[in-house]
Image: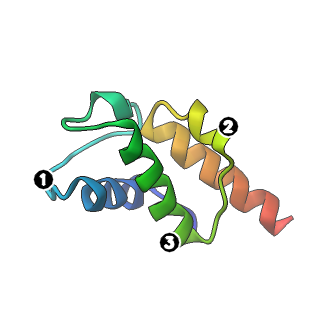
């Protein structure tokens, strides 16, 4: 199963404890209300657990948008399947 916008939105809602958050792939993490750098790590860990992925710290540092996270997760899954 490939992570979708709905999956990432769910992870962000879980981390920020706000089920009303609506985002799109262009949403910048830093623009989310109440967001800080530890929230990004928490969202990435949530995605890692849900999809059995492993992100490196340098990869996390490059994430700016929700779309970036989706693309990186898809690429990791493709590599694992190859």
Residue in the picture at 67% in, 37% down: 58
Q: Is residue 50 left or right of residue 20?
A: right
Of residues 5 and 19, the one drawn nearer to the viewer in this rendering: 19
- Quarter where residue 29 is shown: top left
Crowding around mark 1 (Cα neighbors within 10 Å: few <14, some 14 to 19, many 20+) is: few
Please say which color scheme the image uses: rainbow
Give the labeled residue for mark 3. 50
Residue in the picture at 36% in, 59% down: 11
Crowding around mark 2 (Cα neighbors within 10 Å: few <14, some 14 to 19, many 20+) is: few
User: Mark 1 to mark 3: distance in Å?
Assistant: 21 Å
Counting residues from the N terminus, which is met first, the one under dot 2 or under dot 1? 1
Q: Position of residue 59 (x, y in %)?
A: 65, 40
Q: Are marks 2 and 1 in contact (CB under 8 Å)?
A: no
Which quarter of the figure is the C terminus placed in?
bottom right
Q: Position of residue 1 (x, y in %)?
A: 57, 71
Residue in the picture at 45% in, 33% down: 65
Q: Position of residue 54 (x, y in %)?
A: 67, 60
Give the labeled residue for mark 1. 20
Q: Are marks 2 and 3 in contact (CB under 8 Å)?
A: no
Give the labeled residue for mark 2. 58
């Amino acid at each position: 199963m490939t992570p979708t916008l709905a999956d990432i939105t769910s992870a962000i809602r879980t981390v920020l404890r706000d089920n009303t958050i609506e985002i799109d792939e262009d949403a910048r993490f830093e623009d989310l209300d109440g967001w800080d750098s530890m929230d990004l790590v928490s969202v990435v860990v949530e995605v890692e657990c849900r999809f059995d992925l492993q992100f490196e710290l340098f990869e996390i540092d490059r994430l700016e948008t929700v779309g970036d996270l989706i693309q990186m997760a898809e690429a990791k899954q493709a590599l694992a399947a190859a």
